Amino acid sequence: MAPLSWRHHTLLQALLTRGPLSDRDFHALFTAVSGKNPPTHQQLFNETLLKINKDLAYLQFELRACINQYDGMVYYGVVNNISDEESKLGTKYSVAQIAFYKGLLEAIVQEAGNDGRITSIDAINVRLDNQVIIVDGSQDSQSRLPTSIKNFSFSQKEKTLEELIRDRWLSSTSTGKIGLGTRSFLDLRSWFRANDIPSCVVCNEACIKASSCPNEGCNVRIHDYCLKKKISQRKASRACPGCSTEWPCQDDEADGDDDVDEPGEDQAPSANRSSRKKRKRVKAELVEENDNAGPSTAVPRRTSRSTKAEAVEAAKDASAAGASQATRTSKRRKK
């Protein structure tokens, strides 16, 4: 097998030093080192990633892509495929911090509102003792917890929370809610499957942030971006794959009016609504101009209709006159 070239090394170095890169940034980097644009040279792009992963497999590492379920964007990163105690020695986090992250992870994936986030207050109140396995199941197990776990204060939790967000293991919103970060989506694919996290019926990836079927008795869940892509297809059914319940419209979907041409796949629903409103506004302006212009602009249309009516009336009169003439002629012949 040929060794990795400087181009492969550059891609790996960028991911290792900068952390996960967005689809746009990674494609721009690939274009810079290869002179080829990934969308138009997809085969070359795939072959490059395959070459890198064949060499990384010996070290149990992988260059992987994932979708951040909060913004729907694709990210690339290098992950460790083995999670063991030896691997934990390479992390900068302490045992207590790792236990805190595990507690946050469980709280986020078990969040019942399908938002995939918890409040910062709930995050600070996550317990660490549930994340430590005591081999001896005696009643005194609580007192046998490591000192670092028992003495992990609220201020230490706040500091660790900030570090996890900065390192992109977690993410936060402007309202203070805490969710998973890009690195978690990259690294935890096998963990999601091992812990029976519900999967999206469209892409088969774990559902952290997703929409649930409107039928409460149905367990089907679909990512928002998967649902949008599925429904945007012209002949796609809105029926739930599990129970056939009609899936409700999303906020940004266009209204389905029969008198408007169906938009193409590359048209945004909002553009459809804007076009419809524009046509209504133009029609209203034309009517207003017609009313304000007076008889001079209204006459031609009415004159055309009046002329047509007069022609029909004249044809009727001519027909009646012809019948009357025929009757008189007939009477004269009889005389």
Image: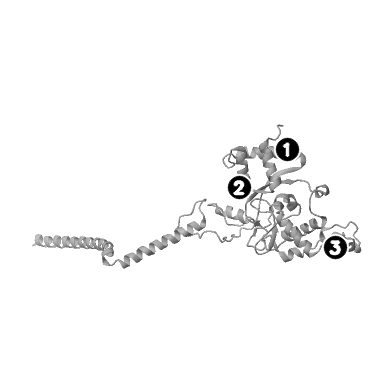
Q: Which residue is mark 3?
A: 150
Q: Could you say which quadrant of the image residue 306 lies in?
A: bottom left
- The reply to whether residue 258 is in sight is no
Assign a secondary structure to mark 1.
Answer: helix
Where in the figure is residue 318, as x and y percent of width and height?
Answer: 18, 60
The amino acid type found where label 3 is placed reads: Lys
In the rendered image, residue 202, in percent from the top left (x then y), is placed at 63, 52
Residue found farthest to the left: 335
Element under disc 2: helix
- How crowded is the residue under tag 2: few (<14 C-alpha within 10 Å), some, or many (20+)? few
Label 2: which residue? 24
- First in sequence: mark 3 or mark 2? 2
In the rendered structure, which amino acid carries the disc numbered 2? Answer: Arg
As measured in the structure, the alpha-carbon distance from the residue carrying label 3 to the one carrying label 1 is 43 Å
State the quadrant of the N terminus: top right
In this rendering, would 191 be left or right of 245?
A: right
Which residue is found at the position 22% from the left and 60% from the top? 311
Q: Which mark is residue 55?
A: 1
